[in-house]
Amino acid sequence: MSSAILLFFILFIEFFAIFCSVKAFNTTFGCIAGERKALLRFRESFSEPYSALSSWKGQDCCTWLCIRCNKFTGHVISLDLGNKGLLGKTLDSSLLELKHLSYLDLSGFDFQHNSFPAFIGSMKQLQYLNLSSTFLHGVVPHNLGNLSSLRVLDLSYTEDLVVDDLTWISRLSSLENLDLSGVDLSPTKDLLKVLNMLPSIQKLGLSDCSLNNTNLQHACVNVNYTLNNVRYLDLSYNSFDGELPCFLHNMTLLRELDLSINNYSSTGLHLFKLSNLVRLNLGDNSIRNNVDWFSEFLWNKCHLKSVDLRSNQIYGEISTPFRNLSRCWNHNLEKLDLAGNRFYGHLPEEIGGLKKLMYLDLSNNGFINGTIPNSLGKLSALTYLDLSGNRLSGTIPSSLGDLRELISLHLSFTGLSGGIPLPLGQLSNLDNSLDGTVFENHFAKLSKLSELVVGSLKFKVKLDWVPPFQLQWLTLESCDIGGQFPQWVQMQKELLELEIVNCSISDTLSNSLYNYKNLLALDLSNNHIQGPIPNNISQMVPSLDILYLDQNNINGSLPDSLCEIKSLQVMDLSRNHLSGNLPGCLGNLHNLNAMKLSYNEISGVIPNSTGGAASSLQWLHLNNNNLTGKLPFSLKNCTYLTVVDIGENKFLGKLPKWIGNYLLHLEVLILRNNNFFGLIPFEVCQLLKLQILDLANNNFTGGIPNCFGSFSGMVVNFSKSNNYQFPDYVYWQYESFTQVIKGQEREYSKISRFVVNMDVSNNNLVGKIPWEITRLSGLIGLNLSHNHLVGKIPQRIGDMKSMESFDLSNNNLSGTIPTSLSDLSSISSLNLSYNNLSGKIPTGRQLQTLDNPSIYEGNPQLCGAPLPKKCEEASMVPSITDNHVAANEGDNIIDDKVLLSIVIICGFATGFWGVIGFLVFNKRWRQAYFEFAEERIISRLFGG
């Protein structure tokens, strides 16, 4: 017994000595020296513009910012560099020396569109890995499957990552949280089979992954695909359609489900068993269920806090779901969004029974009528109420004044009458079409006001009025505010967003902008603001992200101080009277995403430095100015350009080949009305995403490249496609440009995303129209007029089903008009005038409505309606059928392959009969030939 006690005592002393030595080591020398050196080498592989790691000094790395060590061993166990503004193309693999690192957060790291750091797949001790929002490019390495201890993996919104095969993820048996939102998963098959092999998975984020039904093709066949441990599932912003996924009914532990922004048309019965649901989002689909389904769904949802069914086609009487408030679903409900559906009828008084409701949106149903029930005033927790876009009547009930927590109220376009009740004391967002005049006393009790949005109202306040609030968000649209920039707005020192649009302000910017140090977004568009942009604008709005000053009377040149607003992302100064040259410092705006300077009087050249905005610039509008010179080679660095509109200027030179080699994301290229010349380079055909190509009114020569048929962006008909998602829709909704379609110059703004057009008119192009161009089935407009084109109109022209405008006038085309032209069911503008076309004009279908003879004038050999010249019998012989033409590769009856075959056959026949004919008809030659052949054969066989 005593020996055992003695042994225990000795072991205790040794353990205590080791512990003290470790503590002394850490106290004296800091963290492990090798790990400190590894961290410093790692730091050298990237840049830190904001000096986020300035504390990485000294011996003890455990005291450095973003580092956490094991307090007993000194080993680095956590490296949290998330959202520190770091950037670099590659990372040093020295992190592999941190053998005990279990937590790694590199979220927000700007990899500048370089490939995934593969060495991370060797850090097998990791339990947490976050590479979200890191601007990575390429394929996710399969060796991430080696991280068997991983519990959290977040690769969301890494800009341009693809998973070609997801089977590696099945090896992550400890994974609990997986977020691949924004990663392209379209190549993966049997997605659910792979995910079902993750026994611990509880949270799945698969939003915006380019998924559709084919990725879940066996989900309903195998009943073992349950995902029954998942609590959170996000499949939003994909292209799923039809009925909701059948595997949902087995996910009984599910608490949050987001299937919004898809194309689902039916819910089926798959949601009824999900009694643990807390949040459900089915918004922005095409669900056509009756409201009775919604009532039945709510029956057993006692934990439900949020329901979003906005922008679907659910129909029925709006009072139906509120008849079951005796059930438990109303106990916890905080958000109910039924906007943009087809509900009708009166709002029921029972709606006041939702005691915890904070957010209620019933807007834009159109057929909800009657008065606003007084019981809404009982929703004491309500902060947001939107009833706009319905057919309400009567006045706003004074009971709404009891909603002391109300922050946002929207009652526009409702049919309500009367004034704004003064008891609405805590109102923070007012958007209405009521009385039309707002006085100071409407704001008397609004000391908590943080957001104010009003439209089409008249402000009747004193010039020296001091409001009782400090706003953060202010929007005044189409309001009468007195012509000058309001002094009470200048007093709002805490503003983050300021929009005063179409309010007839005739002041100057120097008098308007005042000490807005925190302002992130400024929109003063469509006013009468005059004078120059202040030279000290960077001091007035130093934190600005978004600047809209378009459609004013601003003059003068662009000051260099604009370039000092480093955070600027969107700059729209279009439709003013700006002059002078573009400042050379524009390339310093490294965050600039959109630059719109169109419709001004700017001259000079595009500075070479403009390419400095390489990593961010997507939208470049310089059209309708006086710019000249060649396109700078530095623009090739702006590889993420999506829209380039430099039309209506004086640019010159050849169309650079680098446009097709580097600007591979281009969807809109407008060069019309300039002085470009030379051949259209084949490299342009590498711009596969193009949906608008406008080269009109230049001096291009040569032929139309055959490869023009490869523009995949002109194949999809965006306006009719229900499955196409627009990842940049937020930007596109503000996009606008001018195109000549149907013979008229039109400006496309809100629908610009759906315009698909090719215009190469008014050049010096020669040769035939390539038949490959008929592959562009999504083209709405095609204009090849005023060139020197010859040959026939492609027979397959009828394949271009989306075509609405087609102009081949003023060329040298010949032959008959293809009968397939009548297959263009959407055609409404056609011009084939002044060519050498002949024969009968096709009839039928949509062509019957195009009865203006000017469409075909200048073709003396054409006949038939709508021309007065009638066809003779010979000219009425039907042309070759489309079925016959479809069997050929091109648009000619005998194309190149057929001609080649004929040449080969003729050559063979000539050679064959040239020899055999002599042998048949000349006995002496025949006898000599066979004697020679016999001698050769015998010599071969017997070696003679």
Image (tube, rainbow, N blue to C red):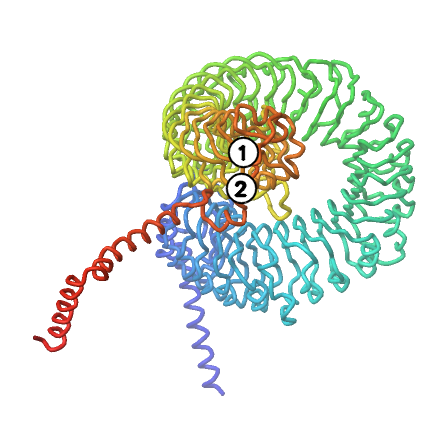
Residue sticking out furthest to the bottom: 1
Toward which corner of the image does residue 198 lie, by quadrant? Answer: bottom right
Q: Secondary structure at mark 1?
A: strand
The disc at residue 879 is: 2
Report the amino acid beneath label 1: Gly
The reply, left or right, for residue 641 in relation to residue 372 is: left
Three-letter code for the amino acid on which mark 2 is drawn: Ser
Nearer to me, 919 or 697: 919
Percent x, y of residue 916: 24, 60
The spot of residue 561 in percent (x, y) is: 48, 21
Q: Is residue 247 above or below residue 67?
A: below
Write the residue at 89% across / 43% down: 345
User: Quadrant where the C terminus lies?
Assistant: bottom left
Residue 378 x, y percent position in the rendering: 88, 43
Q: Where is 233 relative to 840, above or below?
A: below
Identify the disc placed on residue 839: 1
